[in-house]
Amino acid sequence: MDYNYYQEYVEKINGMAGIYSFDIMPDGSFSEIRLIALNKMNGGVLNMNPDAPKFYPGIPWRTYFTDINFESYIYNCASNSEFLYSYTNAHGFWLKGFYLPLKETEEKDGIKTVYCLYVGTFSPQLESDAMAQHSLEVSSAVMNISVRLHESQDFQQSMAATIHEIKKICLAEKCGLFTINKNTMECDFISENGLRNDVMEQIASEMGRTPYEVAQAWENDLADSDCLLLDNLSVVKERDPVWYASLCINKIENLVLYGVRFDQSLIGFICAANFDTTKMMLIKETLELSSFLLGTVIANHQIMSHLKVMSTIDALTQVSSRNAMDERVKKLVSGESKLPDTMGVAFIDLNGLKNVNDTKGHNAGDMFLNRAASVLKLAFGDYEIYRAGGDEFVVLCPDITQNIMEERITQLRALSDNTHDVSFSVGYVWLSGSYDINSAMRTADERMFKDKEEYYKLHAKNDRRIRVNAT
């Protein structure tokens, strides 16, 4: 074998280039992959690890890396004399790879040695034109997935339809989408039948992990690759014995675990089990493109969900916002939400907030509001608490009895009396039968102001109205 010939050949290539070889045994099995030649750019990548051994022709590939997806492409390219292309988001980069089978083959004692030329480039940003270099079959599969992704405005419905499509492509027994929100450490599992967090909880329980811990373990199992595409579970057994045991319990023989990323951040996994292993290349290429589309939709859903939460939760006190209250009342008035048989309405004003802001500053005022909200949660935590604005809160208590409503108001007053600086002015009504929620809220508001008048008679020095008039 003329190694110098191979070395001179790859040095002429602009990009990361290397020639790989392996043996095909008489029984059809493959030996490990050997690295025969590599150009300076590829050598620079390999030598990024200071502990990497010095290259020599024929050094085992796994001396440098273990990437079963890359190896799968090398094996398929050289053994089937097939030109292959990949475009993946792995190792923190977008990697474009071309795999070309070489005619040079050697055979001795029934052992056939074959060769593959790999040429690759990488970039930190997605190149849209690089995603178009795929077969008609792959393009068609991706198009079908894209249609499913956008055929419904409901996120869970569109994801369920997408998973159904991916399951058909893989001819898999089981298939699902495991989403991750790293900001909230929350996970969801969606199958072709919709949201199935019970399945996710069962999987996590079998491993003695929380769902988020499962996601963290799977991210480690990927080992910076884009996916695990396995026709057997030997890699899982080596990398994650706990997960391997769970897979065995559930009679899983092979699996796909494809990382879904957005802006290089992992936000989910496509999972498929007991799939058709003859379709591995089709599955890999299809998911390379589909995971990008999925990542965009999932990230958009998470952003919109966060904005929705932000618009319905008061950021300071973490009770519901004025927007949420207005939307709730609007639905009750329009009939979109059924009017409860009974309703308690309380208007609650925090006494003395302006005085705290004026004398101690707004940071102290914010802490004052937080303490007040904590007292409210103790009294009405199982009902609907809204910050209507400034120092005003509104509590709606659907399906409450009159006795319990009065008990809660009494409890609120007792709690504030036992809190050295928190005092409320309160007005409330209890309703049953046919009633007007807007009229009830006005009545509660008027009663709150009467209660405030009594408070300021006893605490004139805190009456901001007197101070305003005096100026």
Image (spheres, rainbow, N blue to C red):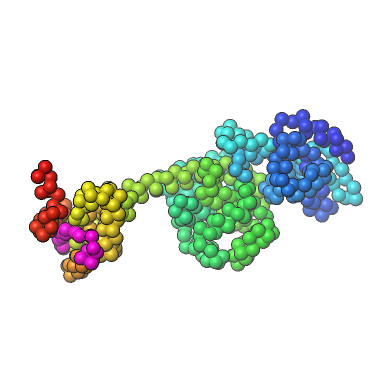
Is residue 136 on the magenta stretch? no
The residue stretch that appears in magenta: 415-432
Q: Is residue 295 left or right of residue 251?
A: left
- Residue 165 appears anywhere in the view: no
Q: Is residue 348 left or right of residue 454?
A: right
Front residue of this view, candidates 48 and 32: 48
Q: Is residue 463 left or right of residue 211?
A: left
Locate the C terminus and report the quarter of the image it occupies: top left
Q: On the image, which quarter does residue 88 sit in?
A: top right
Is residue 424 on the magenta stretch? yes
x, y percentage for residue 134? 62, 37
Q: Residue at x 22, y 48 (%)?
A: 358
x, y percentage for residue 436? 15, 55
Is 155 rendered above or below residue 407?
Answer: above
x, y percentage for residue 78? 77, 42
Q: Residue at x 26, y 50 (%)?
A: 360
Front residue of this view, candidates 139 and 367: 367
Q: Residue at x 13, y 52 (%)?
A: 463
Count numbered badges in the picture. Answer: 0
Is 138 rendered above or below residue 222?
Answer: above
Is 52 rendered above or below residue 378?
Answer: above
- Residue 423 appears anywhere in the view: yes
Q: Is residue 290 left or right of residue 28?
A: left
Q: On the image, which quarter does residue 446 sit in?
A: bottom left
Front residue of this view, candidates 132 and 222: 222
Q: Residue at x 54, y 40 (%)?
A: 143
Residue that protrudes farthest toward the front in the picture: 359
Locate the N terminus and report the quarter of the image it occupies: top right
